[in-house]
Amino acid sequence: MNMPQQTECPNCAEPLGSQDAFCGACGTSLTGPPTLRDLPVVPSCPHCGATELTDGRCRRCGQAQPRERDHQERELTGVAAVSDRGLRHHRNEDAFTVATAEGPAGTPAVLAVVCDGVSSSSRPDEASATAVTAAADSLVAALAAGREPGQAMREAIGAANRAVTALAHDGTAPDGRHSNAPACTYVSAVSSGGLVTIGWVGDTRAYWIPDDRESAEPYRLTEDDSWAARMVAANLMAEAEAYADPRAHAITGWLGADAEDLDPHTVSFTPHVPGVLLICTDGLWNYAEAATDLAFFVRADARAEPLATAQELVRFAVERGGHDNITVAVLPIDPPTAPAAHDATLLDVPLPRAAEPDATVPLRPAAPPVAPPALLPPHRPLPSRRRPGRAARPGARRRARRGLTRPPPPPPRRRPADRSSPHGRVVQARRAPVRRHRRPCRARGTGSSGRPVPEPPRARAGPGGPPGR
C-alpha cells in the first residue's frame, strides 16, 4: 500500500515538494526513523528533571512549576517588552502587549500597553490581562480608522475600564482573601508620525530617556494617581516627606467596577533628539524613581537594542530585591525628519541647554523665581546686663557686638522651703522623718483573747557546742 504524498510539513506546515526528503524550514525528516527534533517535547521539572507533573507541581520534589506569565518577552519592529514575576510574589499580576498599526494614509504606528493588577483586589492577574487586550484592540482599530492619537487613547482607556468592570459581574465569586472588585492600573504609549502620545491611570509610569544625556535631560512624563502625589499637589507635604510616608503608594485612580469618577490622563509631545520611551510598573521605578536615576541604568544603545535594554532593566530590579512584579516596554523614538502633520505641541522634550537659541518649553512649568529676601536693618545690640562699675568679660563683649545675650539660666530645682538660722545664714530645711505607725504591742505571753501563750521550748545545747536554733 502506497503512503499518500505529503504536501506540507507535519511540524511547521511548510509547503513540501514531491521529492523533498526533509522540511527546508524546520528540518523535520520526511523519510526514515524520526529524529530528536521530530519527537514531541515532554515537559519536565526544572528543579529535579522529573516528568510527573500534576496541577502545576512536581510529584517527585513538590516544587511549583513555572507558569506562562512568570516571565514573558516579546519584540516587534520598533518596540520590545519584558515582564517578570519577581522574587516575592507567587504569580505575575502584570500584563503587557505590543503591536503595530497603520493609518488610512499608510502612516505606521507602534504601540505598547502595560497594566498592573491591584493586589488588594480579587483576580488582579485577570484584570490586568483583560485591560491590556481590550485597550490594544481599541487602539489598533481607532488608529486604522484615522482617529487622532489622543482621542484613540481616551477611547482605549474607556474600553479597558469597561472590560475590567465586566469581570465583577461575570458571576465568579471573589476569593477568600479579597472582596474588592477586580482592578488594575494602566499606561500605554503610541508613536506615530513623530508624535508620541501617552495615556495612564494609576501609578504606572512613562519616562523619556534621550540618547545624549549630557545635552538633553531625561523626563518623567506621567503624574501618579496616588496619595503622595495629591499631598504634594496640594502643598501639604514636601515630595521627599510625602513619598517617605507609609501611605505614599496608596493609589487614588484605577480601572474597575469600584473606580469612582474615572479621569484618564493623556499627554503628547514631539521629541527633537533621538531616544527611547519607557513605560513600566512600580516594580521597576521603586528602585530608581527619578528620571535621571533610571536613565543611569539604561543602555547607551537602547534605541538600537530595545529588547536587551528591557531585559537589563528587569534584571536590575530583580537584583535589587524583586519585591514586586516587573514589567517594562521600550519604544525607540527618532525625531521626525520631515515637517510633522500635526501642530507643534507645547510639551517638547527633552530640554536642550539654555545657551541654545531654540530652547523648548519644559514638560512641567518651572516654579516662579523666588525673590531675594529684603535686607534687614542693622540689628541694634542689646544693652549689657552687667552691673555698673564691673568690667565685661571678653565673651560678653563678643556677644554684645553680635547682638546676642546670655541665655537665661535654667529654672531652679524645686526644693523644700528654706528657713533662716539664728546666725543669719540660710539653712535648708530638713524634712521630718516619716514615722511608721505600728500596732501597739500586746503584753508578752498573752494572745488576742488575753489567755497566756506558752513560750516555745528552747533548743538544748548539743554535745560540745552552743545551743542550736
Image: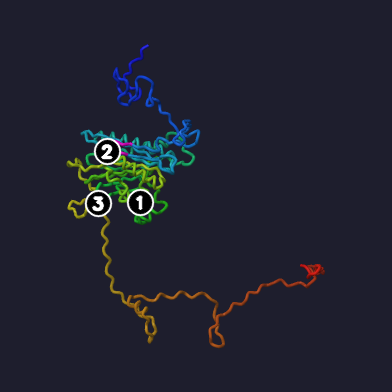
Q: Pick whichever, 126 or 318, lies toward us.
A: 318
Residue 183 in sight in this render:
no
Q: Nearer the viewer, mark 2 or mark 1?
A: 2
Indicate the amino acid at tag 2.
Gly
Residue with the mark numbered 3: 214
**Where, quadrant-wise, is the N terminus in this rendering?**
top left
**Which residue is situated farthest in the bottom direction here?**
423
Give the image location of residue 178, x and y in percent. 46, 41
Secondary structure of the magenta portion, mostly? strand
Q: Residues within 10 Å of mark 3 (few under 14, many from 20)?
A: few
Q: Nearer the viewer, mark 2 or mark 3?
A: 3
Residue with the mark numbered 2: 78
User: Going 49% across and 40% down the picture, which residue do you hit?
Assistant: 176
Residue for badge 1: 229
**CA–CA distance in space, label 2 to label 3:** 25 Å
**What amino acid is at disc 3?**
Glu
- Tag 1: Cα neighbours inside 10 Å, few (<14), some, or many (≥20)? many
Q: Contact (CB < 8 A) between labels 2 and 3?
A: no
Residue 76 falls in image quadrant: top left
- Judging depth in this view, the residue of 42 and 33 nearest the camera is 33
Report whether residue 322 is seen. yes
Residues shaded magenta: 74-80
Residue 162 horizontal/vertical position (percent): 36, 37
